[in-house]
Amino acid sequence: MSQVRQHKPLERGTRLAGKRVIVTGLGGGIGRACALLFVMQGAEVVGCDISTEAAEALLDEARSRNLTLHCMYPLDLVAPGGAEALVAFARAQMGGVDVVVNAAAFAAFAWLQEMDYEAQWKFTLRGELDIVFLLCKAAWPALVAAGGGAVINFASANAMMALPGSPALAHCAGKAGVLGMTRQLAMEGAPHNIRVNAISPALIETPATRAHMTQDPGFKDQAMAKAMVRRIGQPEDIAWAAVYLASEEASWVTAANLPVDGGSTAW
């Protein structure tokens, strides 16, 4: 059997030259990869993270690569005024906004009978739906003022399939909601030349999922059982898909859901 091809690393280019981009959750795995790759592909990037430690680690990494980006931290996007503050900061730093990458999210996992309504169910919907709604609403006038642009949301393979052994009820609901929101926003954005698309990853190796896979090796095996490409996804796999959706290469793509999941949802 041939060796599984590894992911494409981050590299420099000009695919996003001149784009002014907001990336949320840039201290996490997917947000981090998107922020770094977008800058490497010519974009200006302003981001945020709720974690000071994660944000500062990302900024240190950017400096080590001779990359410049700006970050607000610690910033809670679901707190009153949080999203508006980020957009104001982005407009002050870049003069406008062309692309919004909604990578930030948080969730709680529990089986139905053990799930607490406030602390887990509503907490997850706040961290997977409200967080997208609030920034889209805050950034919409800036996108309209720019003459259009792109919004990239993150759903999940779990929006389309259940994963046996995973207590992901609230997560499945939240990410399915992101898909519905994406289609509606694409319709509302079309008259303003705003494209809105979603990416649906399967299991991606991030600091959070790496810890979970270490604690529960069976979780990785369960996730891999349906994958056609026999490796765990990497944040760079998702970042390259986001570059495409943010670029003019995708100028006729809106209301789409792009599965980046190694074929996991194909059967």
Image (cartoon, rainbow, N blue to C red):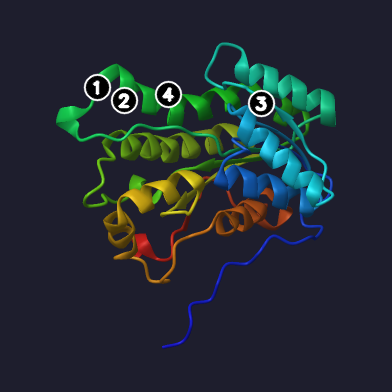
Between marks 3 and 4, how big is the CA–CA gap?
18 Å
Which one is earlier in the sequence, the residue at label 3 or at label 4? 4
Between marks 1 and 3, how big is the CA–CA gap?
32 Å
**Quadrant that contains the N terminus:** bottom left
- Residue 98 appears in the picture as rendered: yes
Q: Which residue is mark 1?
A: 116
Q: Is residue 78 above or below residue 259?
A: above
- Secondary structure, mark 3, is helix
Which label lies toward us, 3 or 4? 4
Crowding at dot 4, Cα within 10 Å, few <14 / some 14-19 / many 20+, comes out as: some
Which one is earlier in the sequence, the residue at label 4 or at label 1? 1
Q: Which residue is mark 2?
A: 120
As drawn, the residue found furthest toward the front would be 215
- Secondary structure, mark 4, is helix
- Secondary structure, mark 2, is helix
Which one is earlier in the sequence, the residue at label 2 or at label 3? 2
| Dots 2, 1 in contact, CB < 8 A | yes
Numbered circle sitting on residue 126: 4
Crowding at dot 2, Cα within 10 Å, few <14 / some 14-19 / many 20+, comes out as: some
Q: Which residue is mark 3?
A: 139
